[in-house]
Image (tube, rainbow, N blue to C red):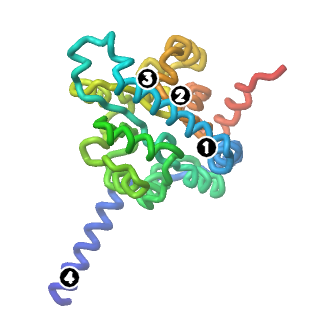
Amino acid sequence: MSKSILSIFLLASATFLLTFAAYPQQPVEKADLDYQTAAVLYMQKAAEYRALAFQAFNLARWQLDADLEKKNVKKLPKAERIMPRAILVDIDETVLDNSPSQAAGIKNGRPFNLNDWYAWGDMRKAKAIPGAVDFLNYAVSKGVKVFYITNRDEVQKQATIDNLKSVGFTDVSNDNVMLRTKESSKDARRAAVSAKYRIVMLIGDNLDDFTSAFEHKTIAERFTETEKARDQFGRRFIVLPNAMYGTWENAIYEYGRLTEAQKAEKRAAALEMP
């Protein structure tokens, strides 16, 4: 074997091993996920979903314009008023649409698992949520720094950056795409941004994207915290709809590690009827 062929072989082998190590193989319990079908179809086929997304980003633009015109900042301490502005956004189901991955899971009877999730991310095929590109690029044009704070894993970083750029987001880099490293809570990452910027608003599809006050709470507690923050929604907190998955569903399962059959029982028991 020539040195050049050997080098190519060794490089290919090393690449394969690194990829295999980064994407741990998991056994996947087959399950009937038909309960998710309506949610996925709503996101993919309902004009009402698109309208809600446009509505969210229209609200975001109105609030940003008000801030740029200093209508919202008069009561802030001077130190905060002179800080550069930032907007924090989640990625999945906030600016990128992963419904094709959800659809594949339904069709193949495969619940969420890292193997499939990483493979979908590597495809870099997620489309932008309606209105997201226009709004965030508008914010960047006004000198606002956008930070993408996501609970994707670090191994997905380059694919995530590539996907964000491919759909048209203009300010995307290693510095402002902040993935999960040790913990799922986003508090530390939000704090890191707020140390240097004044956070004008936060945009997400999950209440945990806004504050840790919602984390690991029961359904009743999440309702209570939502009531407490009611004046923030549409102003500082901009919410995108996501009926496919989220902490709202985890709360139904009481954050337990359940089988798909046990989850189905919990969902059925949670239904309110006459």
Q: What residue type is labelled 1?
A: Arg
- Label 4 residue SS: helix
Query: Which residue has dot 4 on it?
Result: 6
Spot occupied by residue 264 in the image (x, y as percentages of width and height)? 69, 36
Going from N to C along the chain, the mark reached first, 4 or 1, is: 4
Circle 3: element type: loop
Q: Residue 236 carries which label?
A: 3
Distance from Cα at disc 3 to Cα at disc 4: 57 Å
Identify the residue shown where x is 53% and y is 33%: 56
Among the two numbered marks 1 and 2 on one chain, the one whose residue lies closer to the N terminus: 1
* CA–CA distance in space, label 3 to label 2: 28 Å
Residue appearing at x 20%, y 89% in the figure? 1
Out of 119 and 203, give the one closest to the viewer.
Answer: 203
Residue 108 percent coordinates (x, y): 63, 57
Closer to viewer: mark 4 or mark 1 = 1
Position of 193 compared to 102: left or right?
Answer: left
Q: What element carries label 1?
A: helix
